[in-house]
Image (spheres, rainbow, N blue to C red):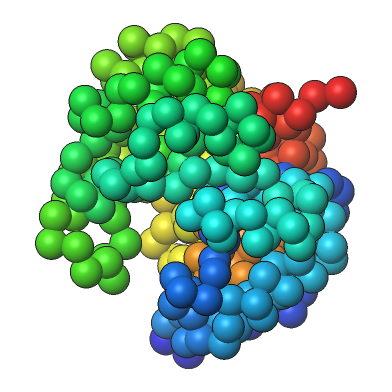
Amino acid sequence: MKKITLLFTLMISINLCVGQVIDVHLHSYTDDIYHGGHPHPAGNIPSPPTAEAHLDRTIELMDSLNIDYAVISNSIKANEKWMEADDRFIPGYGANTEMIPVDEFEELIKNGKIKVFGEIGSSYEGVTLANPIYKPYLEICNKYGLPVMYHTGPPNPGSKSKAKRVFKGDPALIEDVIATYPDLKICLQHAGASFWENAVLLMAYYPNVYADLGVLLWVSPLTQEMAVDFLKRCKKYGILKKVMFGSDQMVWPESIKISINYLNSLDFLTEEEKRMILYENARKFLGLMD
């Protein structure tokens, strides 16, 4: 445990980041839903004591790490608070199975208050994106060209949900959704994690499927090993252009820096490939091209 703590301490203190960054996987908070104030057990990563302090630290890190944009997800209220604080935040509507009414969802898209659907954490409720409850929302996303961000891999083991299921996080289970909406851009968050090989296969086969790296870059040596295996396979198959940087900082904003540093430390990736992952691929996925 001491070696792991030392590794993360070094990665926090040494900034290897160069160039522009887009983080497609952040979470916004208000006081009523913030659950921070305690360090992450992996490397003793600190967590700000309040939602306000968490927001302030996130913005400080965005400034120092050259983060041009960041996709945030949680409640509409939390997103609005963060967007008022900094115009680099892109609002994503986070949900599991309890969602706002479909007509309200569409109206918020029209008003620019939802620009991404997700993070969708259906596996926390024991279902997948293929469940019929998501169909009307996906139809609207398809209509407006709204990207979808879908949690893949096992749910957070710290979740208290009794409905959560590890294997519902396998991205292969949503192939019917992917095939039904060929023009709908879908991001497999956490790159499939334990199911990364299926994520690679879907990305290679379907033009509309992308992935973000999420917690793989920072949460443990095991997930970092998954990230390396995933990235090497994507490079081999020529699909690195569909991989995006996302930190999934949760209540530990320092993980953003750790993630960028770890990605930049991977010597099998060229500088051009790192720039694609950290910036260029997300610009295309989110429609931020000039």
Where is residue 52? Give x, y as percent. 65, 77
Q: Is residue 58 above or below residue 13?
A: above
- Seen at 34% across and 10% down, the residue is 180
Q: Is residue 86 left or right of residue 170?
A: right
The quarter of the rendered structure image containing the N terminus is bottom left
- Name the residue nearer the viewer: 44 or 208: 208
Instruction: Report the number of discs.
Output: 0
Where is residue 255? Give x, y as percent. 59, 68
Q: Residue furthest left?
A: 162
Residue 232 shows in the view: no
Where is residue 141? Give x, y as percent. 48, 22
- The quadrant where residue 138 appears: top left
- Seen at 61% across and 27% down, the residue is 110
- Name the residue nearer the viewer: 155 or 11: 155
- Seen at 60% across and 54% down, the residue is 79
Q: Is residue 8 above or below residue 188?
A: below
- Name the residue nearer the viewer: 100 or 135: 100
Residue 38 shows in the view: yes
Where is residue 42? Give x, y as percent. 45, 77
- The quadrant where residue 290 appears: top right
Q: Is residue 287 above or below residue 9?
A: above
- Seen at 80% across and 24% down, the residue is 289
Q: Is residue 147 left or right of residue 53?
A: left
